[in-house]
Image: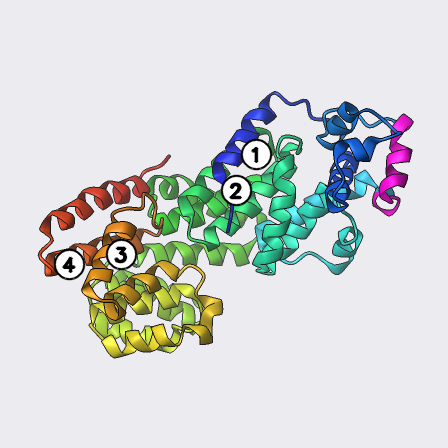
Amino acid sequence: MNIHIPYLKKQLLKRKDQKLYEIKPIGSAIRYKRKQMNMTLEEACEGICSISYLSKLENNQIEPGNRFIDQLIERFQLHESFEIDNDKYESDKAMMAHALLLEDHIGNDLMERYQHRDDYQAYLIQMYDAVVSKNMQTAMEKYNAIRGYVVNLQDDELALFFQLTSILLYRKHRFSEAYNLLQDIPEMAHNDEVLALTTTKLKLMNAFRMHKQSEISTSYHFYLNKLIERHDYHQVNKIKFAHMTYEASFLCRKLVYKTIKKFSHLSEEDKDFALAKSYYHHHDYQKAYELSKKHYMKNNKWLNLYLMIIDRMQKKEEILHVLDSIDTFHNICLGSEILLMHLKFKYQASKEQLLDYLRKSILGFNHITDEYHLLDYLMVDAIHLFSKHQFYKEAVMVTSKYLPRLKTLNQAN
């Protein structure tokens, strides 16, 4: 998944000096059609306007005027795209922002209004639908179509785009990048309560996975109280469960049991996950194993937990079974690739291949994962594997590299 954060940061710097014009998506539509038709700027503007004019129009750097627009619309057959009601678009954006807070699908009527358009407004709506539907391929296509317009997006559009992009990063376990991207949402967008609450929610979800305690202590109760004020009780229950799952790794088990009992609405699977996580982090691997074995094929959070448990219990046959069966449940492996690769080298590779992997992937990569517990697991296991083969210097190097990273994840940026 190619989401290049430095590129987005560069676009943000350009945006600070860019005059934002009234929303007119014709420039992005012309640019899309021109590239689709493999036309250069020279070919596209021939007989109509200057190259400079068309370039500025495509990049929303000038107000489109009637002198050339009609001819360009005719050349690129964009008539349907520009029977546009901007007031309706503003309403649709607000509807999408509210749906994102509640994690709802948007209606078919809304999608139909934008499905045949090729402009950044339509791409934003289409990206939302793809992200919520977990259609990663389409979501990335729309991301790539929009990212070149970061300079030109209005504050609320940029907020929505960054929120959707952060969700894609979250699903790829790129939590720190997702969190930092949310930090870059313009201050003006925070004046919209729905956008501000969604940003807070997404930052919290990343903070839980990274154990970023400062963010959690600052934002959790604020966000919870705001949801209660809005009577968004479904979201209240979701964030409470996410917080409880985060706490399950370090609270004593009696408190975890007590907290779970308060959540009468929880499914048995959710209760099992919180308990299994608590058992695992308190080294009661047998109980954690019994719970995780029932659910590990349901999603990647269960799969990761199950794999770490059976590795701790040295259940080699079960690990090999999972590695040999990946194709049968590949749809839940997104976010588990790092752990699966680690176990593949640990249990199926030669000593030389294992050591080569440890040196290149564990010691060599500056960024492996932002998942706090997975990073901790990889650190401890890499130390054990290097020490087992009497490579004590490398074992010490793992400690030196990973402990500061774990500390950084705990801190607020």
Would you say the residues marked 1 and 2 are in contact, meaning their CB atoms lie under 8 Å apart?
Answer: yes
Question: Residue 29: x, y in percent?
Answer: 77, 41
Residue that badge 1 annotates: 190
Q: Is residue 131 visible?
A: yes
Tell me how far mark 4 sits from mark 2, CA to CA. Answer: 40 Å
Which amino acid is tagged 4?
His
User: Which residue is located at x 46 percent, y 51 percent?
Assistant: 170
Q: Which residues are magenta?
A: 66-81
Residue that badge 4 annotates: 384
Q: Is residue 48 toward the left or the right of residue 243 in the image?
A: right
Q: Is residue 361 toward the left or the right of residue 57 in the image?
A: left
Residue that badge 2 annotates: 199
**Mark 3 vs mark 2: in front:** 3
Q: Residues within 10 Å of mark 2 (few under 14, many from 20)?
A: many
Which amino acid is tagged 1?
His
The mark nearer the N terminus, 4 or 3, is 3
